[in-house]
Structures are given as C-alpha cells and as structure tokens.
Image (tube, helix red, strand yellow):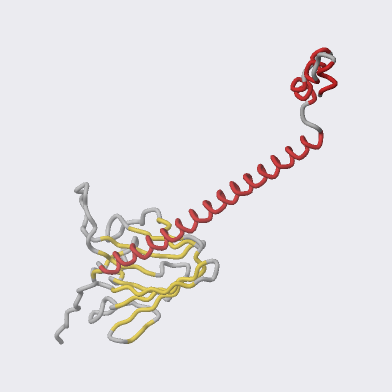
Amino acid sequence: MRRYAEHGFTPVRRYAEHGFTPVRRYAEHGFTLIEMMISLLIFGMLSAAGAALLSFSVRAQGVTGAKLDDVGALNRLSSALSADLAQASFRATRNEAGDMLPAFTGESGSGPSPMLRLVRGGWSNLDQARRAGEQKVEYRLANGNMERIVYPMLDGAEPLAPSVLLADVREVALRYRVNGAWSDTWQGSAQAPLPQVLEMRLVRGNGIEFRQLFLVGAGYAPKVLEK
C-alpha cells in the first residue's frame, strides 16, 4: 500500500485506470457454476418436499372425507331404522294384487326379497295430500346397497324408487325377540303382531361387523283377545 501511495495511486485507482472497479468486476463475473448447481439442488429439494407435503394433505383430506361420509351413511341407516321400528303399527295392508299382508314381516336377512316390511305411523303430511298418516316401508339389500323403499299408499300401490342408505354392505342378518325368545323370521300373529326387539348384524365389504338392537313399537301393548 505504501509503495502504491508513493507513486500517487491506490489499488482502487489502478483498477479504475483499466476501466473497472472491484465491485464492477465481481458483478460482471456473477455466480460460479458450482454455486448455481448448489442453488438449483436446494431449490429442487424444497420444491419436492413441498409437493410431497401437498400430495399427502390432499390424500389425507380425501380419505378423511370418505370416512366421514361413510360414518354419516351408517348413522342415517340407524336413525331411519330406529324411527321406523319405534313407530311400527299393527295395521295390515294389501299388495298390488290385493293379497293381504301382515302388519310386520321379517326375514332372516339378505335375500332377493325385502328382508323387512312394516307399517309405521307419524308420517307428516306437510302438503295436506289425501293420504293416510301411516306409511308402508320395506328394507332390502340389493347389489351391496342397503335400500329403503316406501309406498305412497298403504293398499294396492306400487313402491316409489328406492333410497340407498348405506353402500358396500356384504351381508345383513336379522333376529326378532318377543317375551325373551329369539326368532330368525317374523310373520306375526293376532296375539303378537309385532316383535318387541329387532337385532341387526351388518357386515361391511371390508369385513367389519356392526351389531345394533332396535325397540319395535315403543310403548305398544298388544291387546289380549278374549276367546
């Protein structure tokens, strides 16, 4: 530095005489290839981590949504059965051909025909239509779907389109209890047209089994017929 000073210039002045300063020199040179490669590597790692986190979040949200929808469908089936069975009545009906049907008919479970048929009360008539306050209801398992079928009229009417309450059902088994005894089917009689309890065992497509008990005709007391 002293030698440069004796001749009247400094390193900065010397660089300036050649047309550039150290700052300009470094700016013109920019990043080296190794620095660029390291920067791109770090950017790529951050981008890959962000994409993986986003993908995981989307998958987790989809799985959670599907599980919540399935739990909601199971709860809707339980609520519909509870409401229908609790308001079951002993009103006999007729089919489309005019044949008499018992007030309550129950099969052992899965099969080509409806596994459960009953008449329930408490059918709200919001539009003041000319119909009864009771409704004939059926349940069946079709193509892995638990369906609820309703009739617009009690006697001689054709059913409306079925409503799917629960999908991915492998098997359904029903039992009926009256006075402490269980039965796999129910046809009813004059002395006991309705069972007291219905048991449902439902097996999903993944093998998980659910068991639930339902009260039938809550508060219902059959009349004792005198001989």
Q: Which quadrant would residue 26 be assigned to in this image?
A: top right
- Quadrant location, the N terminus: top right
Q: Residue furthest left?
A: 226
* Residue drawn at (42%, 65%) of the image: 140
Q: Residue at x 39, y 65 (%)?
A: 139
Q: Nearer the viewer, residue 120 or 113?
A: 120
> Which x, y percent locates residue 131?
22, 54
Asked if one can make out residue 205 in the rendered structure from this viewpoint, the answer is yes
Residue 35 figure quarter: top right
Q: Position of residue 189 (x, y in %)?
A: 27, 79
Residue 131 appears left or right of 140: left
Where does the image place residue 214, in percent across and percent down from the top left? 32, 73
x%, y% of residue 135? 27, 60
Residue at 21%, 49% (x, y): give it.
Answer: 126
Q: Locate the C terminus by quadrant.
A: bottom left
Horizontal side of 44 relative to 124 (left or right) equals: right
Identify the residue at image location x=63%, y=48%: 52
Position above or below: 35 against 127: above
Residue 109 seen anywhere in this rendered image of the structure? no
The quadrant where residue 211 appears? bottom left
Q: Name the one closer to the observer, 179 or 152.
A: 179
Q: Is residue 147 above or below residue 106?
A: above
Q: Measured along the vertical axis of the image, is residue 13 above or below residue 43?
A: above
Total residue callouts: 0
Which sits in the foreground, 208 or 19?
A: 19
Q: Is residue 22 left or right of residue 103?
A: right
